[in-house]
Amino acid sequence: MSRIALVLGAVIAGSVLSVASISACGSATPTIPFDPPATPGTEIEGGIGSSGGFGEGGTVEAGKPGCVGLQCQQHACAGGASTTVTGTVYDPAAKNPLYNVVVYVPNAPVKDLPKGATCDSCDSLYSGSPIVTTLTDAKGKFTLKDVPDGPNIPLVIQIGKWRRQITIANVGQCIDNPQADHSLRLPKNTQEGDIPNIAISTGGSDSLECLLHRVGLDDTEYNGGPGGAGHLHIFQGGPTGFGGGPNTSPPGPASASSLWSSATELAKYDIVLLSCEGQETSSMNQQALSDYASGGGRVFASHFHYSWFNSGPFGSSNLASWTPGTNDLGNITSSIVTTLPSGAPFPKGIALQDWLANVNALSGGKLAIQSAKHNADVTAMHTASQPWIKAESKSPGATEYFTFNTPTTAAPAMQCGRVVYSDLHVGAASKDYQGFNSTVPTGCGSGDLSPQEKALEFMLFDLSSCVVPDSQPPAPPVGGVK
C-alpha cells in the first residue's frame, strides 16, 4: 500500500479531504529548456550539444557508457579535485540565508509541483532527475560536487514548494565555481519561480501576513480570499464585535465562512497561517483543521489559536499542558531547545541555535522575545510534540514554540503534515498597522526582521520543508530520482 493511502487511511472517518480532489491556483514558473541529450562520442557542431552543454573538446564524453544528457558532462578530476558550485541561498528579500534548502542540477525539465495539501515523500518533490544534490547549512551555504561542466548549466534551489530555477552561464571543469553573494534567493513572485499557496487568517493581535511581506514577497502576491493570481490569500479573522482583523482592499471574506468551513476549502492551500485574534477563536471547525493537517497540510498558529488544539480532535493527542487566557509574560529571554525528550541531540534545534547566531538574533546566546505568552508547557510526557524555544525569565520552562507532525497517531514514516504553535506575536516587535492603516499589505512595516521574527522565519521555512522525524537530520534527495 502506498504512503499516501496509509496516511489518508489514518485520517478520522468522515473526512472529506482527499488527495485526488485537492486543487489550487497555478503559477507561471520559469522553466529551463531541455532538448534531447546528445549521444556519447558524437561530435557537436560549434562545441555545443543539443542538450545545451559542452563535452571535452566539443565531444560528449564517451568514457561513460550509458550516460544521458548532462551526465555526459561530469568529468573525473586529477588529484582529488572536483568540479564544484558553491554559494549561499537567501530568503526572497535576499537578507537572511536559509537552512535546509535543497540545491541540485536537474537532468530533465522539472515537473509542476502539486497544489494544496499533499502527502509527499522527501524525494518526490525534487523532480527533473537530479544528477547531484546537496543542502544548505545553518549559514545558508552549500557545496555541490561533481557538477557537469560547460555553459548554461541549470541549477534548482528549493525547499518544499518554494522553488527557483536559474542557469549558470558557465561551469569551469575541475575548479570551484562560486556564485556571487546574494545572487541565489527564493522567488519573491511567481514570475521568478514557485511559491506555496498560502492562506492567512488575520487577527486583531498579530500580523503573520506581514511577516511574509518583510521576508520579501511582493505586494502582487496578496489576494483577498481564494481567488486572484497571487499565492497569499487573505481571510479576515477576529476579534468578533470589533470589526475583525486587518483585510485587503477589496476585502477578503471571513475566515470562519470561507477558510476553515471545511477540510475541502483548507485543502486548497499548502500552508495555513492563523494570526492571533486577541481572544479564543469563535466558529472553529476543529475537525476540518485536523483532517487538513493529517492529509499533508501545514499549519502555523499564534497565541489564542491554542483553542484549536486544547480540545477537539487535537485535544486527544496530548500535545501539551494548556493554560487558557492571555497569560502575558512581557519581555523575556528564551533559550533554544537542542535536545530531544530522550536527551539525544535534536538536529534541527541545534541548527536553529546556530542559524539565529549567524543572523545576529541572539544576545549572549539567548533570544529576546517581546510580549511573550505562556499558554503551553511541553514536557517529556507529551510525546507527539517537540519544543523548540523555552522561556528562561519570568516563567522558566514555558514553551514559546513547539511542533508536531500529523497524523499524530501514525508511525513517523507515515506522517506528512506538520503544525507549529507559537506563543509569541510577530506584531509585538514589528510596528505593523501604525496610524490605523489596517490594510494588507500596505499597512505592514517594512523594516528588518526583529530577533523573534527571525525565529519565526526559520520556522516558516522549516514548516515548508518535507516532514522527517525530529530525531533525524535532514538529508538531500537521492540523485537520479524521478
Image (cartoon, helix red, strand yellow):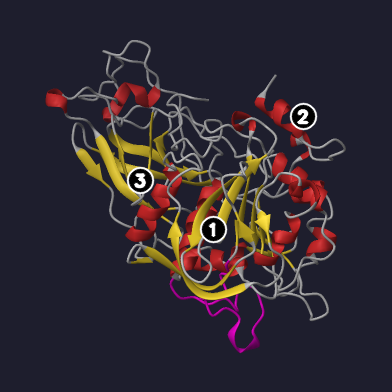
Q: Amino acid at mark 3?
A: Asp
The foreground one among 102 and 32 is 102
Mark 1 / mark 3, whichever is N-terminal: 3
**In the image, what residue type sits under mark 2?**
Gly
Residue type marked 1: Asn
Label at residue 9: 2
* Label 1 packing within 10 angstroms: few (<14), some (14-19), many (20+): many
Q: In terms of secondary structure, what is the magenta stretch mainly?
A: loop
Describe the element under mark 2 as helix, strand or loop.
helix
**Magenta region:** 424-448
The residue that disc 1 covers is: 189
Disc marking residue 137: 3
Task: Examine the structure image and report whether residue 428 is included in the region drawn in magenta.
Answer: yes
Residue at position x 28%, y 29% in the image: 146
- Name the quadrant of the N terminus: top right
Q: What percent of the width, then of the height, locates residue 82?
A: 21, 30
38 on left or right of 468: left
In the displayed structure, does residue 312 sit left or right of residue 185? Answer: right
Q: Does 393 sit left or right of 133 as displayed?
A: right
User: Height in image: 40 above or below 406?
Assistant: above
Q: Position of residue 309 (x, y in %)?
A: 72, 54
**Is residue 226 shown to the viewer in this render?**
no
Q: Disc 2 and disc 1: Cα gap in Å?
A: 36 Å
* Residue 151 on image: x %, y %: 30, 37
What is the residue that sits farthest to the left in this orientation? 79
Q: Residues within 10 Å of mark 2 (few under 14, many from 20)?
A: few
